[in-house]
Amino acid sequence: MAASMKLLIVHGSQKHSIDVCVPDDEENRVVMVEHLALAAWKATGVPVQNQRLIYKGKSLKDPEKTLEEMGLKDGAKVMMIGKKHNPEEEAELKSLEEVDKAQEAVEKKLTGMSDELEGMEKGFLEEPLMTESLPKLEKRIGLSTEELMKMLERLDSTIIQESHIDAKKKRKSVVQRIQVLLDRCDSLLTRTRHVKTKSTL
């Protein structure tokens, strides 16, 4: 029984050479239809639930069947029918992409603020200028925190259908990135207040 198989996926006018492998954490070392579906997803972007895989006129429906049982061998050609996403999921992904771009813009601002603060920590700015700049910096960090919190609220209120796996993964990924940025805001605020305290001594 094979633990991997090289196949050709034909999806519309496109052809994809794929390696179908059994994940390392699986005890069963035999490639199955479910492994083929996952490999096809990675190659084409068509989610598993939207796929119809056909080999020699037969649909590969049962995820628990081995590829050898279905008659497949190295170099076999598998036809695939299916769209990447339905219109509802496309709309969800578009909305999530907007939030993702917004958090990337905040990330750039935070990097700039961090560089600015580092200069103050190293004493590159004269005392009067630093006294003037620190409250402004503190305010900008606070505004960035507010922006990020609003993004989280938007993501929280975005309704994603249970079957839309890609949209759910995307939202989880964006939420995690925003949470990392919120931690950066907290860290920047702590550093700013520390510099502020030192400058008033």
Image (spheres, rainbow, N blue to C red):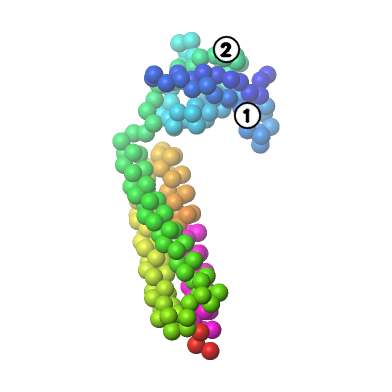
Q: Position of residue 132 (x, y in %)?
A: 40, 81
Whether the residues at callouts 1 and 2 have beta carbons within 8 Å, the answer is: no
Q: Position of residue 135 (x, y in %)?
A: 41, 79
Q: Position of residue 13 (x, y in %)?
A: 39, 19
Q: Is residue 61 visible?
A: no
- The quadrant the N terminus occupies is top right
Q: Which residues are magenta?
A: 179-198
Q: Residue furthest bottom?
A: 201
What amino acid is found at the position of numbered circle 1 in the picture?
Val
72 is higher (above) or lower (below) than 18: above
Residue linked to disc 1: 22
Foreground residue, 179 or 157? 179
85 is higher (above) or lower (below) than 142: above
Q: Secondary structure at mark 2?
A: loop
Query: Residue at image x 56%, y 27%?
Result: 35
Magenta span includes 10: no
Q: Quadrant of residue 81?
A: top left
169 is higher (above) or lower (below) than 181: above
Sequence-first tag of 1 and 2: 1
Dominant SS in magenta? helix
Q: Which mark is residue 144?
A: none
Q: Secondary structure at mark 1?
A: loop
Foreground residue, 185 or 153? 185
Q: Position of residue 3 (x, y in %)?
A: 66, 24
Magenta span includes 185: yes
Query: Residue at image x 47%, y 49%?
Result: 173
Foreground residue, 165 or 170? 170
Query: Residue at image x 58%, y 25%?
Result: 20
3D distance between C-alphas at marks 1 and 2? 18 Å
Q: Quadrant of residue 145?
A: bottom left
Q: Which mark is residue 71?
A: 2
Packing grade of label 2 (10 A; few <14, some 14-19, many >=20) is: few
